[in-house]
C-alpha cells in the first residue's frame, strides 16, 4: 500500500470478487483508490471468482488494455 500512490503509469487491476488471499473490501478497493494515476488511466475488472479468474476473459481484458495504450499489433 505504501507504493500505490507513486504509481504513475496506466493501471489495469484484475481481481476475483471472492478472493480469500486479497479480500475485496480490505485490500483490493483501498489499493485501487490509492494509485496515483488519473481516473481515466486506471481500470478495475472484477470477476465472480476466487483468487484465480478465468484465463480467456483475463487475456481479453489485458490485450484490449495493451492495444489501447501501446497500439494494436501489426
Image: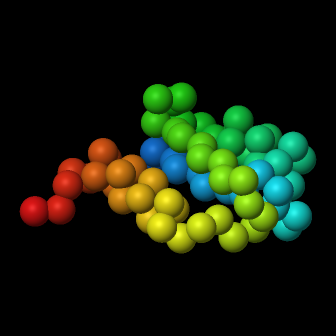
* Residue 51, image x, y percentages: 75, 67
Q: How is the image coloured?
A: rainbow
Please indicate whether residue 51 sits to the left or right of residue 59 in the image.
Answer: right
* Residue 13, image x, y percentages: 59, 51
* Residue 52, image x, y percentages: 69, 70
Number of numbered tags placed on the structure image? 0
Please indicate whether residue 32 sits to the left or right of residue 37 in the image.
Answer: right
Residue 48, above or below 50: above
* Residue 61, image x, y percentages: 45, 54
User: Front-most of 44 and 69?
Assistant: 44
Residue 21, above or below 25: below
Residue lying farthest to the left in this orientation? 74
User: Front-most of 7 and 68?
Assistant: 68
Please indicate whether residue 40 sits to the left or right of residue 30 in the image.
Answer: left
Residue for point 50% across, 60% down: 57
Residue for point 46% across, 36% down: 41
Residue for point 88% across, 64% down: 20
Residue lying farthest to the top in this orientation? 39
Residue 57 in sight in this render: yes
Q: Which part of the image, by quadrant, shows the C terminus?
A: bottom left
Residue 1 in sight in this render: no
Please indicate whether residue 3 sits to the left or right of residue 73 in the image.
Answer: right
Residue for point 82% across, 48% down: 24
Amino acid at each position: 500500500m505504501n507504493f500505490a500512490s507513486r504509481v504513475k503509469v496506466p493501471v489495469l487491476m484484475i481481481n476475483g470478487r471472492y478472493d480469500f488471499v486479497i479480500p475485496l473490501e480490505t485490500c483490493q478497493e483501498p489499493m485501487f483508490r490509492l494509485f496515483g494515476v488519473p481516473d481515466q488511466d486506471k481500470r478495475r475488472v472484477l470477476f465472480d471468482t476466487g483468487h484465480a479468474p478465468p484465463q480467456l476473459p483475463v487475456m481479453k481484458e489485458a490485450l484490449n488494455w495493451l492495444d489501447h495504450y501501446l497500439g494494436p499489433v501489426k
